[in-house]
Amino acid sequence: MSLLDRLSAPVDQAARSLLGCHLTVNAVTLRITEVEAYSGTGEDPASHAHRGRTPRNTIMFGAAGYAYVYFTYGMHYCMNVVTGVEGTASAVLLRAGSVVSGLEVARSRRPAARTDAELARGPARLCSALDINRDFYGTYLLDSHLTPPPSPVADISTGPRVGVTGALDVPWRFWITGDPTVSDYRRHAPKPRKA
């Protein structure tokens, strides 16, 4: 089965198929070690497409295999891989990766990282290590950027997604068990409202 076929599956299955894939962007290659799945409108309140199509999320409604890049907290970029069938929004957030090529380039982009395992631990750090920004939005990944793993990942763990405000307990975060690049789990803690 091709990687495109795997990405065209339901989003939780597509997410698992991304683990171990290699992503090459701007002279750095990562092995994807952690992802989160987000399904389409109505069924997943944590998804950017929950309330329908917007200029920001329109790519999520397209064909599988494209990059959905967004800016968050006024300072970071995060990247998703669009999955599923065209017309139904779904995407997989790339949460962490291990640098397998271009280590010195990644280090130069992430000088605050204390160890190589921290270079792409977390979705914003991953984009920083790869120098991904808004210009990468809509890039087709299956031509030259994203390649399947040399062998299937055998040991996959699953748990709740990190920091989401809705569907807090949906176990759609997937990671390679025991990999040191996997980010720490932090459940969203709503701020108390002022009286």
Image (cartoon, grey):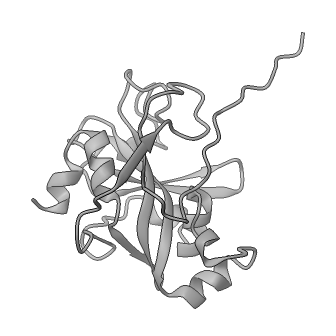
Q: Specify whether 164 is left or right of 52.
A: right
Q: Specify whether 120 is left or right of 69.
A: right
What count of labels does the image hold? 0
Q: Residue at x 41, y 65 (%)?
A: 32
The front one of 52 and 5 is: 5
Of the 4 image quadrants, the one containing the N terminus is bottom left
Q: Residue at x 75, y 74 (%)?
A: 112
- Give residue 126's position: percent from left, percent from top: 55, 65
Q: Residue at x 53, y 68 (%)?
A: 132
Quarter of the rendering containing residue 146:
bottom left
Quarter of the rendering containing residue 113:
bottom right
Compared with 33, 160 (above or below) is: above
Q: Specify whether 152 is left or right of 67.
A: left
- Give residue 21's position: percent from left, percent from top: 32, 67
Compared with 135, 186 (above or below) is: above
The front one of 78 and 133 is: 78
The front one of 121 and 144 is: 121
Q: Specify whether 194 is left or right of 166.
A: right
Can you name the residue that lies furthest to the right here? 195
Of the 4 image quadrants, the one containing the C terminus is top right
- Give residue 190's position: percent from left, percent from top: 72, 26
- Give residue 69's position: percent from left, percent from top: 49, 55
Q: Residue at x 19, y 53 (%)?
A: 6
